Image (cartoon, rainbow, N blue to C red):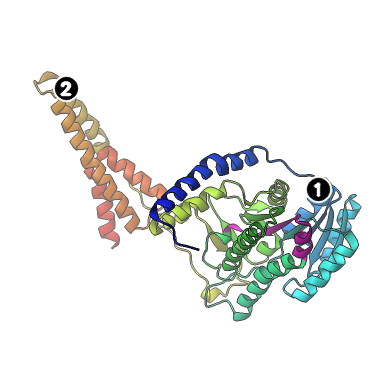
Amino acid sequence: MARISRYELFCSTIGALLHVFFVALPKDFWRWRKMTQKDVRGKTIVITGAASGLGKAMAELFAIEHGAKVAIVDINSHDASEAAKEINERNGVALSWTCDISNAEQMNKCAEEIRAEFGQVDIVVCNAAILFFGHALQLSALELQKSVNVNIMGTINTIRAFLRPMEERNEGHIVAISSIAGYCGETYGLAYCPSKFAIRGVMECLQMEMKDRGLNAIKFTTICPYFARTPMILNKGMRPTSLFFPFMSAKRCSKEIVDAILKEKIIAFVPEYLSIVTSLKNLTSNNVRMAGREYLNCRYEPITKSDIDHDKMLTLSKTTDYFQSLDLFWKLVTPIIFITATIWWITSQLSALMFIGLLLLAFLSRSFAAIYAVILCDQLEFSFLCTFKWFAQTVLFGLPSLLLLLHYKVKTS
């Protein structure tokens, strides 16, 4: 590409901004405003990992509630067959295939059989995944490699097996189930989180490639759910903990996922407000991110010893909160001093400006003391709730509250 002058660069920048504000944003807004579920009655939907958990719940929704023909692909032959049988008994249409998605040859053969049985494949949902929890040095090389083979290569193999016919007709829909773990790395997640990060990369690469090749009618949807109560999670002896994000049922989670797929969303978080966390994470500094993690309490918590050796188990840092309310004496002295000062100002010749200045000085001194109390609480590893209590008490009563906290710090150091 030939170099352009600064003038041309300036004009190009203005042109790009004009396009963003008057073309791109209105298009996106209109698309969002008119977003409705598409009709998939009689369409063929392939779902990997659909013998249980989210995959099975999605298969039931697509087949029974939306009238689609569902191809259940799973390495577990018995459970896949049972899942298809249950759907058929409820007046849905489903067939099962046994396949190891990490094996490209098996996946290609499976795709051919599905097309021979159902014809054109309209939607492919890459849901199959494997999960290992453990410390960085505790996870075996085999577990790490298996995560790559199934979660990353399995997704790529599945997409490649169905992509060519979609390219030929410039039509189709590829869906990949990533995770909030694909945005936020976490303790115990060395095997799982990077693979989910990779899923987002795979989908974005494909989306850009199809655009550049003029195949814009092929849709791509990346789903990033919080953790759901599926066998994959529950059988690993871990559970996610958070103050704000529910450990969802598979039914609730799958319903939101199916809605996002049918609306052809490009990226969808489940629940939707999860997107706020990922956006803020990218805009904040390291210590702010760490504080946010502590506040949201986003962790994985061991609940059994089956998959994590007890002698190697990480003990999550626990806060030892301490709060002491001031004696009644100090609680009475503060308002008495304020009332006395107000009476003195009214009865004296002191100007209002001077009185306000003294009040402001007192407020600032207490504010600085309260901020120092917050710093002390951080050093003592108090919870945010306990920190707020010390802050509020120090703002209201000043030095006596701060001295209480300082005394506790000296005593425990």
Image-based side of 15 in relation to 32, left or right: left
Q: Residues within 10 Å of mark 1 (few under 14, many from 20)?
A: some
Q: Kindly identify which residue carries mark 1.
A: 40
Gap between marks 1 and 2, in whole Å?
77 Å
Q: Residue furthest top?
A: 347
Give whichever of 128, 19 is nearer the camera.
Answer: 19
Residue 267 pos. (x, y %): 62, 52
Which secondary structure lies at badge 1? loop
Is residue 240 one of those drawn in magenta? Answer: no
Q: Kindly identify which residue carries mark 2.
A: 343
Image-based side of 295 in relation to 260, left or right: left
Residue 190 location, quadrant = bottom right
Residue 297 pos. (x, y %): 50, 55
Q: Residue furthest bottom?
A: 141
Q: Is residue 188 above or below residue 21?
A: below
Q: Are marks 1 and 2 in contact (CB under 8 Å)?
A: no
Q: Residues within 10 Å of mark 2 (few under 14, many from 20)?
A: few
Residue at the (18%, 36%) spot, across then down:
361
Is residue 178 one of those drawn in magenta? Answer: yes
Q: Is residue 153 above or below residue 29?
A: below
Image-based side of 26 in relation to 42, left or right: left
Residue 195 pos. (x, y %): 60, 68
Residue 233 location, quadrant = bottom right
Magenta residues span 162-180
Q: Amino acid at mark 2?
A: Ile
Residue at the (78%, 70%) spot, across then down:
75
Q: Is residue 139 above or below residue 181?
A: below
Look at the image and tell me whether residue 395 can be seen: yes
Q: Residue furthest left?
A: 349
Which comes sooner in the sequence, label 1 or label 2?
Answer: 1
